[in-house]
Image (cartoon, rainbow, N blue to C red):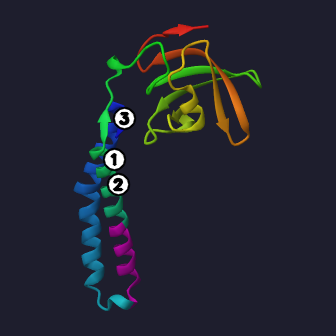
Amino acid sequence: MEYLSKQRYDEIAAELKHLINEVYPKVTDDLAEASAQGDRSDNAGYREARRNQAKTISRIRFLQKILEHSRVIDPDVLPKDRVCLLSRVEFTNLSTNTRMAFEIVSPHEMDLEAGKISLKSPIGAALMGKKVGEIAEALVPSGTMRLRIESITLEGEPNVDSV
C-alpha cells in the first residue's frame, strides 16, 4: 500500500485517462496503417508502431497498478509534531552545518528539484517519526549523516514548531 497526496493521485489519474482516451487510440491507428503497408518482416514503420503500442500498454498497466494499490492520505489525520508523510522538514547537517529543507513524500512523488524526497530514501527514513530538536542519523553512501531537525510543517499548514 502506497499513500499519495491528493495532487499526485489526481496527476496520475489524469495521465492514465489521457493515455487510454487519446494516446492509445492514436497508437492503434498508427499500427493499423503501418500493417496495411504490406510485408511486416521488412516494415520499419510497423516495428516502430508495435514498440509504441507495447510502451503505451506498459505505462497504462503501471499507472493502473499505482492507483489500485494507493490511497490518498488525509493531511488532517497526520501528526503535526512529528515528521511524517507530507511533512516539510527543515534540518541542519551537523557535520557541515548546512541547513536544508525537504518535503517527505511517497516514492511515486519524489522530485529532488522540487525539494521532495522519498520516505524510503536514507534521509527520509531517518527523519520519519522524529520531533523538532531531535537528531536523526541517516546512513548514506558517503557515511553517516547526523541531522538536527529545526522545524516541521505540514502541506498547507503554518510552522508547527521550530528551534
Q: Is residue 29 left or right of residue 49?
A: left
Give the amino acid type for the residue marked by disc 2 in the picture: Phe
Q: Tell whether position 36 is magenta.
A: no
Q: What residue type is labelled 1?
A: Ile
Classify residue 23 as left or right of residue 103.
left
Q: Which of marks 3 and 2 is nearer the N terminus?
A: 3
Query: Residue 24 appears in which quarter of the rendering?
Result: bottom left
Q: Where is residue 19 in the image (x, y as percent from the top left)?
A: 29, 55
Farthest right residue in view: 96
Residue that carries the numbered disc 2 in the rendered image = 62
Per the image, label 1 sits on a secondary structure element best described as helix
Dot 2 lies on which element? helix
Name the spot of residue 132 as percent of width and height, x first.
57, 13
How far apart in space, not on screen, are marks 3 and 2 (Cα)? 15 Å
Write down the residue under mark 1. Answer: 66
Residue in the picture at 38% in, 86% down: 43
Q: What are the residue bounds of the magenta stretch?
A: 42-54
Residue 6 in percent (x, y) is at 32, 31
